[in-house]
Amino acid sequence: MSDSDPTERSRVVTWEDPLIGSELAKTMSGLEHVQALIDGSIPPPPIIGLMRMRPISAEVGTVVFTCDPDESHYNPIGTVHGGLVCTLLDSVLGCAVETTLPQGQGYTSLEIKVNYLRPVLATTGQLTATGVVTKPGRRVAFADGTVTDAAGRVVATASSTLLVFPVE
């Protein structure tokens, strides 16, 4: 939805070559990579623009993203699809784990459990997701996360197990 015309129901999503950032990631620590995404020195992955997410801050073991839900995220019952919130959580949990990894290590989600606590609407306002590593690891890592709405209410929580592995 356009900021200038609230009745317009279209969006254009553009992105850069996603392999640029993934190749550059191999040359830096996980924290350096996430910070480069935040400061814009590495192009963000396409899902960032598609889902209207933004990485905001990163330190070892903790990452914060924001997300601006709109009608384009609605499901058939007229609320923001839970998949958007799950994707937001999966992103902060994975990036939180990434901040603990040295150069040459990657990660992927093994599982994620999400608890949805309240509905999200286009009028809910900006969401803030925080991911925190609860146990870093050389093979497996664990992280927990929360999503709050613009009023500071928790709308969802999650826990995740992530596989850590060397990247080629």
Image (tube, rainbow, N blue to C red):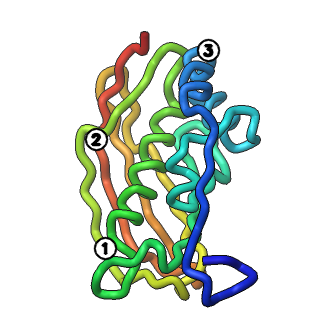
**Which numbered disc, 3 or 1, marks the residue that appears first in the sequence?**
3
Q: Amino acid at mark 1?
A: Tyr
**Which numbered disc, 2 or 1, marks the residue that appears first in the sequence?**
1
SS at mark 3 in the image: loop
Residue 97 position by quadrant: top left
Question: Which residue is drawn at the image coordinates 70% and 86% (left, top)?
Answer: 5
Residue assigned mark 2: 161
Q: Which mark is residue 27?
A: 3
Question: Gap in Å between the C-alphas at discs 2 and 1?
Answer: 18 Å
Residue 32 position by quadrant: top right
Q: Amino acid at mark 3?
A: Thr
Question: Which residue is drawn at the image coordinates 71% and 79% (left, top)?
Answer: 3
Question: Gap in Å between the C-alphas at discs 2 and 3?
Answer: 25 Å
Q: Which mark is residue 116?
A: 1
Circles 2 and 1 in contact, beta carbons < 8 Å = no
What is the x, y in percent for residue 150? 59, 80
Query: In the picture shown, does residue 25 fall above or below 157?
Result: above
Question: Gap in Å between the C-alphas at discs 3 and 1?
Answer: 37 Å
Pointer 1 local density, CA inside 10 Å: few below 14, some 14–19, many at least 20: some
Q: Nearer the viewer, residue 46 or 145?
A: 46
Q: Amino acid at mark 2?
A: Thr
Question: Which residue is drawn at the image coordinates 53% and 19% (left, top)?
Answer: 102
**Which numbered disc, 2 or 3, marks the residue that appears first in the sequence?**
3
Circles 3 and 1 in contact, beta carbons < 8 Å = no
Q: Is residue 110 left or right of residue 100?
A: left
Pointer 2 local density, CA inside 10 Å: few below 14, some 14–19, many at least 20: many
Q: Quadrant of the N terminus?
A: bottom right
Q: Which mark is residue 136?
A: none
Question: Which residue is drawn at the image coordinates 30% and 47% (left, top)?
Answer: 160
Q: Nearer the viewer, mark 2 or mark 3?
A: 3
